[in-house]
Image (cartoon, rainbow, N blue to C red):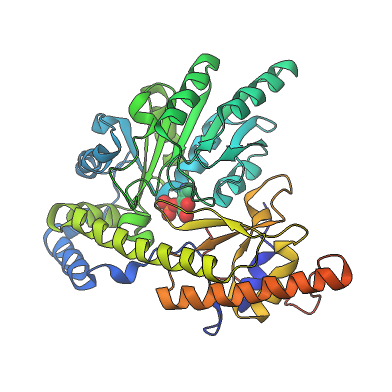
Amino acid sequence: MSASVIRALFSVASRPEVVSLAGGMPFVQALPLDSVADTVHRLIRERGASALQYGSGQGDPQLREQILEVVRPVGISCHPDDIVVTCGSQMALDLVTKVFCDPGDVVLVEAPSYVGALGVFASYQCEVRHLAMDEAGLLPHALQGALDTLAAEGRRAKMLYTIPSFQNPSGVTQTPERRRELLQIAQAAGLLVLEDDPYGLLGFTGEPPTALRAQDAESVIYLGSFSKTIAAGLRVGWVIAPHGVRERLVLAAESAVLCPSNFTQLTVSEYLATQPWQEQIKAFVELYRERRDALIQALQATMPVGTSWTVPQGGFYSWVTLPDGLDATAMLPRAIAGRVAYVPGTGFFADGQGSQQLRLSYCYPEPDRITEGVRRLAGVVEEELALQATFGTSLPTDPGLPATAVPGPEIS
Ligand SMILES: Cc1ncc(COP(=O)(O)O)c(C=O)c1O
């Protein structure tokens, strides 16, 4: 495990004068906080003795029943026993990797992929191989090619890790055809699929995309989370897994945390039972759609020719490709000096790709701050292009920036 070098920069980026398009923090201020307070108050008054007690390693039975309702819109129907509650889906990623992967095992992931998952795979010494994507998601021929290459090496992949809907960091969503093709390849190869779906209910148009797990209950392990639809601070997520896997996950969970917090599980359960949670998700979706629009309009209006970006149909992120020759990591200190922050693309790869790319998050800042942040970023890119024209290359990182790693804002 290693601390991210960009943490040091984010200690500067969290200053109020900097517009941070870096963090993937949900806008929890939009929750009806008085109602949440009433929910917690009622919970402690009426069920305090169980909320403050140890619970089951698999998670609260009533909450597992309620999760069935939450996954119905993505097409999943399962039994409450199929569900294991975790402390956020980050813990689920850790548990699944712990259970399945030995050092040196190959995990296939999208290019780019979620930084927190790459951290988990690295900590279990997995070998990560990235698979190319286009605007319809992970490319089936990239998956097939990787499986063929491994077979030629006399090896097999342990699993495919994918975020099919509103991916972090690219914002891309797999089309239904793509999902079918990918599942066919995985099934033919006997490949385990780890589907991470924290953003599935945060689509801006139409029905939520149908989960891979809805089409294959045997080879897909599904990860869900309340972090983006209720509150990240509650740390409640879940795994839906086939029977044999589930038993092992519960054992691994018990050895890590005994049981997930009963207090936060019952808070979620009470919230789902008494609050209009579907309406609240719609309110979040409206808010994020407005911010996505502000981001895309500002990119269109200000970014120099040669810059491109994805237009997400849900979730929190757009993936930007800089003009040829520019390096997003080298540019970051100058961007922060220009009072705007982003996450450089290399963080989303295990193999050093991504230097020309960066991730912009629109979930947290208000729309006018997003517009201002993009205007500043465009200015920095213009200057970078001017430097490149003068010196023939992107300048290196400024050595005068803070060297100590200070925990910065959430950069998931
Ligand atoms: C793709 C993905 N998976 C997992 C997580 C972790 O979520 P949780 O808060 O449920 O641990 C995140 C958080 O940003 C994410 O983007």
Left/right of residue 75 with respect to residue 365 in the rendered view: left
Residue 46 occupies quadrant: bottom left
> Residue lying furthest bottom in this view?
17
Left/right of residue 61 with respect to residue 13 in the rendered view: left
Which residue is drawn at the image coordinates 37% and 30% (left, top)? Answer: 213
Which residue is drawn at the image coordinates 45% and 42% (left, top)? Answer: 173
In the rendered view, tell whether residue 412 sits above or below residue 341: above
In the rendered view, tell whether residue 386 sits above or below residue 47: below
Residue 268 occupies quadrant: bottom left
Which residue is drawn at the image coordinates 48% and 63% (left, top)? Answer: 296
Which residue is drawn at the image coordinates 47% and 30% (left, top)? Answer: 178
Percent coordinates x, y for residue 186 in the rendering: 51, 22
**Residue 395 in view here:** no
Left/right of residue 371 with respect to residue 330 in the rendered view: left
> Residue lying furthest right in this view?
391
**Residue 333 in view here:** yes
Residues 266 and 340: in front is 340
Residue 165 occupies quadrant: top left
Residues 289 and 216: in front is 289
Percent coordinates x, y for residue 407 in the rendering: 59, 70
Percent coordinates x, y for residue 267 in the rendering: 24, 57
Percent coordinates x, y for residue 109 in the rendering: 59, 37
